[in-house]
Amino acid sequence: MSDQLPEQQPRSGVIHDIGYRHYDGPRLGRFAIFQALLVSSLRHAYGIGRSGKSKVMPILLLAVMVVPVVVIVGIQNVMKFDEPPIVPIDYVFILQPVIALYLASQAPQLFSRDLRYRSIVLYLARPPRRTDYALAKLSALVLALMILIGLPLFILYAGALLARYDVGAMTREFATGLGGAFLLSVLLAAIGGLIAAATPRRGFAVAAIIAVLIVSFTAVITTTAILSPEGDLTEPAARYANLGSPFTLADVLTRFVLRVHSEGNWVATTQQGLVFAAVYLLLVGLCVWGVNARYAKVARG
């Protein structure tokens, strides 16, 4: 074996100066990261910044929410009704299936994708904390639902003003509708976020959210029909049965807190209202804790 080393090839590498510079600007903290994640998640909830296919479902559902009120406003201004044909707070809960479909389609986009592609590990590295991530995602989903529900309510309000109804009464009804939309959005976002965060598989999350919302609402309608066949819900047991669905829970709580009286609906007594408020807060708190605990488990690997 020869002791001579092989002839070395001449090196031809070149170092290029591509202008890297040290960053000397302000160091943004957790709040800036939270804000950026919130805005990015809200944009993604409507397909902005994503593929064209991702925009179809949220925009279609938003159109389904808006088009009926545009028609109502047009008829209202042409026919000159003595009072608006629909109250904003009622419209919030009329299109429950559309809201449920939006939640089922977009909650997994905000929560499941990062788990599926393991990008959540990068998010949970310093400096953001898992609580910041969970709250940013939940807040973005709440705002997305508020846009979905609040935009048609604003159109109803503008149409009522164009029809020259009483400004004070219309403003109160609009504010009441927004209050109901907020309570419903917080509850649905908490429930949908927990279900979506539980699995990285988008299909499972979509099916689970739809199942929970539809089964719970169907169970409430069936139970109240059995307990109160006449439909007046005078029996306390029939009223408490509304605790079983997020939609009916938010509806009853909204009418209790804002003291909304409308035909065909009932307002809870003080005792009943406090029970509904306690269940609402407990459910939202447990769901938020569950989402945070889920990301704590992911952060630990």
Image (cartoon, rainbow, N blue to C red):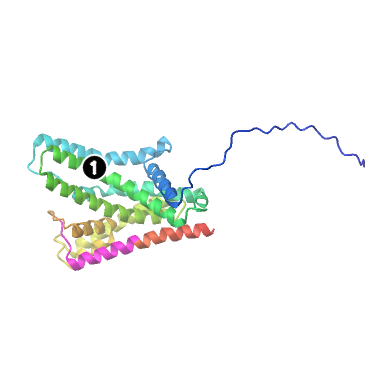
Please state the horizontal and vertical placement of residue 181, each as a whole percent of the image. Answer: 25, 51
Please indicate whether residue 106 sits to the left or right of residue 23 in the image.
Answer: left
Q: Where is the N terminus found, in terms of image quarters? A: top right
Q: Report the residue marked by disc 1.
A: 152
Q: Amino acid at mark 1?
A: Pro
Magenta-colored span: 265-284
Identified at 79% across, 32% down, the residue is: 10
Residue farthest toward the left in the current orientation of the protein: 82
Identified at 40% across, 61% down, the residue is: 289
Q: Does residue 295 appear in this view? A: yes
How many discs appear?
A: 1
Please indicate whether residue 126 sits to the left or right of residue 18 in the image.
Answer: left
Please state the horizontal and vertical placement of residue 117, each as a whole percent of the image. Answer: 51, 48
Please state the horizontal and vertical placement of residue 282, each as a whole percent of the image. Answer: 32, 64
Within the image, what quadrant is residue 47 found in? top left
Crowdedness of circle 1 by 10 Å Cα count: few (<14), some, many (20+)? many
Q: Quick check: is 83 in the magenta stretch?
A: no
Q: Main secondary structure of the magenta part?
A: helix
